[in-house]
């Protein structure tokens, strides 16, 4: 694919101005997440102005023939790490090469992560990322912010980021012990803050303590190659953390977005909890859908290390197909890439010890084609679902919809003319990413973008990539996405804790052993709360335990089993957990 590169101060526009700002896409089939129909599209000044048949178009528009092709919303990749400083080096793809590659593959917006060290101001980190990205991005972008430490200052800065800086999502890490990892109680505080702000809580779910212990054990046994990267963090290490994160978020009444669901068992956790009514969204990666972890056992060190990412690809070769089933059936909601690339010489930092191999792989360029090939061509999903998982659902979750994620009048002209039958073979030799390796090397995929339009500009044009550095815009993501928060807010109102009005206890009270109190040793009685707050959300209404809250076990002993209950109440579908149980 030949390229023309410019920067926004020296835009090398071919043809006259109006032909560039006015486009007429003729004869294609529109595919949105909920319907398909034949219509022409008229675009002016970066916005879709008209959609339908027999449109009356102003003069000077460039016509693009889309007959026999699909017109889809440009892809949104909600998980990238362009030029991330990480594990002693910096990701090879920066905001220029990364977004150029995104556009080449049909992705017209990325959401990258601000992730800085513990102790660094979130606002300073945000400004640093804006400084890197604004001048380089070829397509629109937004930012999530990683919360790697917790304090009052962090809480205040989260608020400023939401109210003044266009951020609506925060990620915590349960892995990367001593670097990014947060303990459960801090995670709870972050999730509560997100809920208060109407922001999306996100989590990297792997048990960082276990990874630390198991990786030391493996090294002490002399297992130091890339295979140990998977061995120290098998599926259950991901599944346990996934379950724990969902529990903590539910207790905080926060919606939760789980980045990179990489294993069957973690996927099952997400699916089960969604069926119980939890507001949780799971993200599948192009890597996890398109390849597997058998590569870690490859004899070539570079090949094996080239696949190292966290959580790892799984050695069970049926995993990609299983994750695709979950994505097709709405158990997982979104696809992304976690694009975070490192060249061979960067991966080689860990040549003698897998723990030092920089984690991360490519995907931003190939995601759309991988999902078309493995999802749509396999018959697992239809084109509407393809649009939902590559674009619309991310737009809805991060409150960009319908400006992004839809082909409709008034939406941004981020559009791809997609040829479902065209094919290409993926290779590091021909891709647009800066990295020297591609985890999908040699794979032939059907589903290829013929034209890519970003913000009304044709950037992939009859096979020629014509990107403009700095043309992309920072897109603010407002808080309180209805798609995410509407159920959460209703539950909040329904489940307010209520105290039980009762007369004061007037009987005798035993003498407290002061030395025990001084040592803060608590009663061994498991049903005695450590502090009054421990039960703050275990409300009872009218003398009956509020079963709408999931802090209660639905079976087995309860702390107040000795108390009389009111007659059975049937709750068909309580918020936070569907059940037909009687109590
Ligand atoms: N995922 C990965 O391997 N690298 C990027 C950093 C992260 O998201 O954990
Ligand atoms: Zn990531």
Image: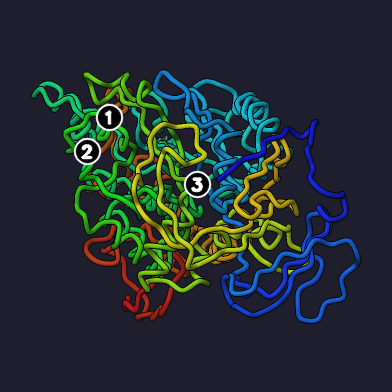
Ligand 2 found in image quarter: top left
Give 363 or 260, whichever is nearer the viewer. Answer: 363
Q: Is residue 577 above or below residue 81?
A: below
| CA neighbours of label 2 inside 10 A, class few (<14), some (14 to 19), many (20+) | many
Q: Earlier in the sequence, mark 2 or mark 1?
A: 2
Where residue 276 appears, x then y in whole percent? 38, 68
Q: Position of residue 447 (x, y in %)?
A: 48, 62
Q: Whole-Å distance between the Cαs marked 3 and 2?
A: 23 Å
Asked which quadrant contains residue 351, the reply is top left
* Residue 530 point in image, percent of width and height: 34, 40
Does mark 2 have its CB less than 8 Å from ligand 1? no
Which quadrant holds the C terminus?
bottom left
Horizontal and vertical percent for residue 495?
51, 63
The residue lying at 83 percent from left, 77 percent from top is 55
Of callouts 3 and 1, which one flags the residue occurring earlier in the amino acid sequence? Answer: 1
The CA distance from mark 3 to mark 1 is 21 Å
Which residue corresponds to mark 3? 365
Q: In this view of the protein, which residue sits in the foreground, 531 or 581?
A: 581
The residue to which callout 2 is attached is 296
Of the two numbered discs 3 and 2 in the rendering, the one whose residue sits closer to the viewer: 3
For label 1, the residue is 302
C-alpha gap between disc 2 and disc 1: 10 Å
Q: Residue at x 62, y 29 (%)?
A: 129
Can see residue 547? no
Q: Earlier in the sequence, mark 3 or mark 2?
A: 2
């Amino acid at each position: 694919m030949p390229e023309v590169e410019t920067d926004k101060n020296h835009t090398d526009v071919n043809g006259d101005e109006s032909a560039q700002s006015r486009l007429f896409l003729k004869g294609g089939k529109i595919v949105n997440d909920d319907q398909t129909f034949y219509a022409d599209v008229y675009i002016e000044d970066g916005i879709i102005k008209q959609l339908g048949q027999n449109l009356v178009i102003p003069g000077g528009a460039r016509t693009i023939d889309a007959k026999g092709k699909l017109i889809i919303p440009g892809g949104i990749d909600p998980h990238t790490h362009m030029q991330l400083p990480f594990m002693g080096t910096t990701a090879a793809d920066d905001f220029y090469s990364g977004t150029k590659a995104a556009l080449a593959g049909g992705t017209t917006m990325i959401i990258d992560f601000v992730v800085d060290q513990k102790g660094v101001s979130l606002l300073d980190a945000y400004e640093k990322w804006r400084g890197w990205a604004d001048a380089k991005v070829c397509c629109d972008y937004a930012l999530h912010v990683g919360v790697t430490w917790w304090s009052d200052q962090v809480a205040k800065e989260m608020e400023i980021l939401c109210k003044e800086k266009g951020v609506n999502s925060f990620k915590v890490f349960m892995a990367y012990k001593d670097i990014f990892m947060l303990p459960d109680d801090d995670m709870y505080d972050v999730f509560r803050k997100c809920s208060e702000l109407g922001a999306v809580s996100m989590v990297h779910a792997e048990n960082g303590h276990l990874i630390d212990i198991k990786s030391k054990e493996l090294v002490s046994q002399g297992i130091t190659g890339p295979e140990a990267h998977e061995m120290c963090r098998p599926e259950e290490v991901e599944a346990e953390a996934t379950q724990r994160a969902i529990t903590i978020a539910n207790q905080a009444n926060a919606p939760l977005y789980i980045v990179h669901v990489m294993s069957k068992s973690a996927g099952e956790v997400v699916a089960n909890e969604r069926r119980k009514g939890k507001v949780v969204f799971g993200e599948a990666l192009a890597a996890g859908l398109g390849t597997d972890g058998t590569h870690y056992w490859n004899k070539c060190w570079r090949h094996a290390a080239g696949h190292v990412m966290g959580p790892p690809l799984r050695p069970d070769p049926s995993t990609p197909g299983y994750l695709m089933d979950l994505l097709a059936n709405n158990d997982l909601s979104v696809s992304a890439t976690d694009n975070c690339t490192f060249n061979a010489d960067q991966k080689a930092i860990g040549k003698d010890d897998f723990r030092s191999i920089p984690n991360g792989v490519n995907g931003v360029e190939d995601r759309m084609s991988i999902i078309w090939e493995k999802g749509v061509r396999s018959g697992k999903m239809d084109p509407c679902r393809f649009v939902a998982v590559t674009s619309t659902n991310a737009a809805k979750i991060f409150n960009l919809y319908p400006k992004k994620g839809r082909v409709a009048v008034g939406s941004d002209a981020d559009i791809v003319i997609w040829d479902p039958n065209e094919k290409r073979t993926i290779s590091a030799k021909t891709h647009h990413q800066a990295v020297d390796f591609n985890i999908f090397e040699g794979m032939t995929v059907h589903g290829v973008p013929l034209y890519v339009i970003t913000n009304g500009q044709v950037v992939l044009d009859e096979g020629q990539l014509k990107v403009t550095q700095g043309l992309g815009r920072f897109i603010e993501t407002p808080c309180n996405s209805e798609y995410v928060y509407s159920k959460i807010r209703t539950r909040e109102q329904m489940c307010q804790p209520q105290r039980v009005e009762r007369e004061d206890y007037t009987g005798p009270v035993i003498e407290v052993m002061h030395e025990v109190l001084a040592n803060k040793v608590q009663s061994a009685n498991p049903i005695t709360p450590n502090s009054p707050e421990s039960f703050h959300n275990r409300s009872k209404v009218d003398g009956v335990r509020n079963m709408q809250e999931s802090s209660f076990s639905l079976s087995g002993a309860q702390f107040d089993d000795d108390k009389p209950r009111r007659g059975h109440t049937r709750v068909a579908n309580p918020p936070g957990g569907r059940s037909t149980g009687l109590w």
